[in-house]
Amino acid sequence: MLKFQVNSHQPMRLVHFLHDQMKGACSLRALKSDLEKNRCQVNGVTERYASFRVKKGDRITFLQKDIEEKKPNVLFEDDHLIIVDKQAWTTCDEKFMPPYRLVHRLDHQTTGVIILAKSHTAYQEMVKLFRERRVKKKYLAIVDGVPKGKKGTIEQNVRVMSRKGNQVTCGVSKWGKPSITHWNIEKKSATHAMISCLIETGRTHQIRVHMKTLGNPILGDFQYSRTFSYKASVARVMLHAHMVSFTHPITKERLEITAPIPKDFKELIPR
């Protein structure tokens, strides 16, 4: 993964900026192809257009095409379900472990627990559990600053505000869907904190939007916050789907599955 910051006062096309920074190591044609494959972000937002104009201060993250995505680590598997630890920069689509069917999704920058079904029956039963809010989901996040109090609950309606290609931006709106996030400070310093979040609802970008409105955006989430008080070098949104627990819809076994905290996340946990 390569990280750049634009220092020139003169706006230039993204593809030309990357070409210059990489000193011609990749052709313009190859870079355009990589952009179309969602390999580049500008200020935390995926940018697919070679003609996009970057300006002074923009932060660019570029995933080199020769870096192969790691196979997900299997956390649990039986005849009905397979639960894996999703890596950062992996998109939850039909190409993600194609023999199986995704029960839910995570943003491509978010790491952690993902549940897939091996049969149509298992898929339907798991979707029902999610719909009835019988799946407990715990996330960890590194946030800018320190929230007031040790814990709290955010109840705000969230809706999709705009779409740009495959990029979705959400926000708080009275016309949105009810969204509930319970947060708790796990560790803190004077500058930032690690919080745990239990979500009763699974709206798109729910935790990201809620923490932004609380005044403590998730570090690396340049889509919802252009600046951060805590100055750290962060290449992605620091959000990790740490644990899920539910009763297996087929075997009736009680499951609690935890995904290990990734290295880049650990490095930002307050000491």
Image (cartoon, rainbow, N blue to C red):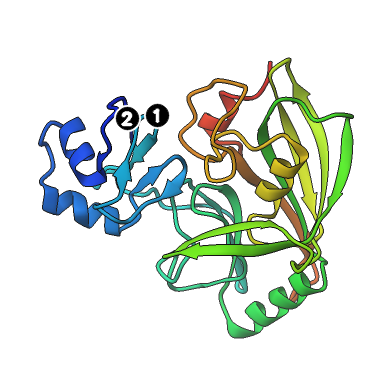
Left or right: where 188 falls relative to 41: right
Q: Which residue is mark 2?
A: 6
User: Is label 2 in a helix, a strand or a loop?
Assistant: loop
Whether residue 33 can be seen here: yes
Left or right: where 113 falls relative to 129: left
- The amino acid at mark 1 is Gly
Q: Which residue is mark 1?
A: 57
Q: Quarter of the image holding residue 14?
A: top left
Q: Quarter of the image holding residue 79?
A: bottom right
Residue at image position (18%, 42%) is 16
Residue 246 rendering spot, x and y as whole percentages: 78, 62
Marks 1 & 2, CB-CB < 8 Å contact? yes
- The amino acid at mark 2 is Val
Whether residue 257 can be seen here: no
Q: Out of 135 and 161, give the one closest to the viewer.
A: 161
Residue 42 rendering spot, x and y as whole percentages: 39, 42
Residue at image position (39%, 45%) is 41
Looking at the image, is 124 positioned above or below residue 68? below
Residue at image position (72%, 79%) is 125
Q: Cα distance, mark 1 to mark 2?
A: 5 Å
Looking at the image, is 158 positioned above or below residue 50? below
